[in-house]
Structures are given as C-alpha cells and as structure tokens.
Image: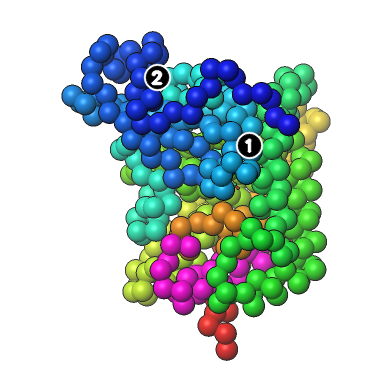
Amino acid sequence: MFDKLSEKYQPLNPETVIEYARTRPELREIFREGEELESVEVGDGNLNLVFKVWAKENPKRTAVLKQALPYVRLVGESWPLPTDRARIEAAALEVQTRLAPQHVPKVYFYDPDMYLTAMRNLDEHVIMRKGLMQGIKYPLFAQHIGYFLARTLGYTSDLVLDYRTKKLEVARFINPELCKITEDLVFTDPYRYHEQNIYHKEIEPQVLALQADDSLRVEVAMMKEKFMTQAQALIHGDLHTGSIMINQTETIAIDPEFAFYGPMGFDIGAVIANLFLSYASHEVRSPDPEGRADFRKYLTDSVIQLWQVFEREFAQVWKQVDAINMPKGYQDDYMLRLLQDSAGFAACKMMRRVIGLAGVADIRAIEDVTERSIAASLALNIAQPLIKQRGQIRRIEEMVEIATAQKPSYPWP
Ligand code: SR1
Ligand code: MG
C-alpha cells in the first residue's frame, strides 16, 4: 500500500547508529575520525527511533539522529505507517528554519534512504510537558511560540505565496496517512465506542454522556471537515507540549512529521489545548491553593499572550497583501475566524488526550485514580463549552474565561 522501503533502509540500534554516524561527512565537525562514540535510544514518542550520539571524550560534542520506523511504535508492526513522513518532516523543518530559525532545531542532514534526520542535540532543554508537570514556568514561551506560529503559518499561506508556489507546496506536503491518524484519533474515535480508546472506568459516565451528545458531535464534525479541507498554510500538525523543547531562554519546536497544508487554527489550538490540559492537571498536581492559582495564572496568561504576539506578528503578513482585494474588514474577519477555529481545535485536542488512544502524561501519569479522574473530568468540562461556544468568542480573554469558569464533575454527586 505504501511506497516500497529503500533497499538501503535498516532500522538502527544503539550499536549500529554509531557505525552509521561515522560514515556521515556532515558530522565530521562534531565527531573526530576514529574516536570512540557512545549512544542511547531515547525515543519516548509514539512513532520513531531517536538516538543520542556523543563523543566519549567530550559528551558536549553530540547529535540526535531520528529515524522513522515503517510502523507505529506505540502499537507495533500491525499498524504500518509510511516512512515518507521523514521526508515531510525534513522538508517542513527546512521551511520553518527559513521563517523562524531560532525556534527550530539545527538540521545537519536528511538521509532519504534511511528516513533519518540528524539534528542538534537539545540536551540543554527539556520537553515542555515535563516542565509544566513540575510547575516550572517558561516566561518567554508565549512570545516565542506566538512568533513561530505567526511566521510559519502566515508566510506559507495564500496571503503571501504566489498562486503556483502555493499549489506546488500543497502537493509537496501531501501527507495522507499521518492526516488519517489525526482524523481518526482527534476527530472520530473519542466520540464513539472504539476499542482503541483508553480511559479509566471512573470517568466512564462522563465519557458516555459526551459521546451521546449529538450537538457536540456536530461541532466536532465541523472541525474535522475544516481539518480535511482547508489548505490554509503549512501547519506543524502535532504541536503539543511534547513537541516543544524549552528552557528559560529558548523555545524549539520539533517533530513536524504531521505537517501538511491545513487550517492554521489547528496548530494554535494544539498549543492552547496543551496549556489548558496542564491547567486541568494542576487541579490535583498543585495541592497548595496559592501555588495552584499562581501557576494557573501563568498558563492562562500564556494563552492570552501567545495570541496577542501571534496577532501582532501576523500584522506584518497583512502588510504584504493587496489591501484592495483584502480590505481591513476581511482581515479582521480572518483573524476572528482563526481565533474561533483555535478554540474548536483546542477542544478536540483536549478531548482526544483524555479519551483516545494517545493520552498525555499531564493527566495519565497522575497515579492516584481519584486525582486522575478529577483532572480528566475538568479537561473534558473545559473542552465542551470551548467548542460549543467558539462562535461567540471575539477576544482571547473570552476563551480563557470559558476555561477558568469550569469545574470537574468528578467525584459524582
Ligand atoms: C498513533 S500516533 C498517536 C499520536 O502520536 C502523535 O504524537 C500524534 O499526536 C498522534 O495522534
Ligand atoms: Mg511527534
């Protein structure tokens, strides 16, 4: 069904990746010829192999090698997946590097035979989700991600690209199988019985009520249609806080293998969803009320600020468009639609992370089942009004007001 694997393709392991790294001229500036190298496989995502390789003599001379497997790692060989996603990721990283280099990992090379990208080892950063779980604030995050979103989305859209380049880019980034994963896992399976759904029985009443809510399913179907049909910009496609490496000074978006031409709100909504999932998890992760309120304020301020920065940077995009064809009223309407789309997509992404196959550690790693249920319940209760009321949202603050007004339904009265 998918393209035949390259004859040179070999899934690597911690030994063979060292031999492989030695053969690559692009890594000669990092590793000296013949020197001893060490490696470890660190992939904790759902799909790929990820190796860190370093010089034994000086671990600061290091690189990450990410290789696609021909199947979904989370599930196994029974779920085949095209390795073409590695090409898509490398191409997306190239586009994003042109537009926002400070927020993209430096790529050393892409090997089309091994479906492998070698890039900067971000050892001085942490996966943002892990930091947020510990209640660590990243004060520059909103500014950085707002800028990244505005530049990577605005400058890959019809607002800037000429008619031909845009269509060729749409074709270059056709990514059907990865989109199908999203269509199923984000927009379909969580809203019906599906054997792949994963949730604990304590929140089953809430899940069943959600699945029986026809008006909710209509709204989700509308978001799914938008995801499947609106080739608005080159989107990252999976911009959750596990795809963001961060520290107090830098924010780096990794893993754009789900990239394709889709609706901008899907990326913006993904970031917002993950901040709200963290918000829900701190209902129990931060037992001290003052500490909880303080961290939650950081999260909701980040939602507001990222949108404000996005709007401000996107104003630069509008300066490039023909104001006769796209007058101010159209521009205002476009930005409002983006805001409302972001709310709808954020909601879908929150619900899938609670009910669907691939959850988030913010909630699923809460050991105590009562506490986990409280956090999961709150996340579902934030998501539902977000999607249902998105048409009335006119300012980012209103999105935050909807989220912060919700309470968990668990424990049941
Ligand atoms: C089967 S893949 C599950 C999820 O992992 C990726 O990170 C995407 O979010 C996808 O939906
Ligand atoms: Mg990923």
Residue range of the region highlighted in magenta in the rendering:
364-387
Magenta-colored stretch includes residue 16: no
Q: Is residue 271 left or right of residue 43?
A: right
Residue 380 on the magenta segment: yes
Could you say which disc has been placed on residue 81 in the image? 1
Q: Quadrant of residue 204?
A: bottom right
How many residues crowd mark 1 within 10 Å: few (<14), some (14–19), many (20+)? Answer: many
Residue at screen point 69% across, 40% down? 179
**Above or below, 28 relative to 303:** above
Q: In this view, does 308 lie above or below 316?
A: below
In the displayed structure, does residue 388 sit left or right of residue 15? right
The yes-or-no answer for disc 1 within 8 Å of ligand 1 is yes
Q: Is residue 390 above or below residue 18?
A: below
Which residue is more in the foreground, 375 or 324? 375
Would you say residue 97 is visible in this rendering?
no
* Quadrant in the rendering for residue 62: top left
Residue 257 position in % (x across, y down): 58, 34
**Residue designated by label 2:** 20
For the residue marked with disc 2, what is the amino acid?
A: Tyr
Q: Is the magenta stretch mostly helix, strand or loop?
A: helix
Image location (x, y in percent) of residue 321: 71, 28
User: As shown in the figure, which amino acid type bears the numbered disc 1?
Assistant: Leu
Q: Depth check: 70 or 33 in front?
A: 70
Q: Residue at x 64, y 38 (%)?
A: 80
Label 1 secondary element: loop
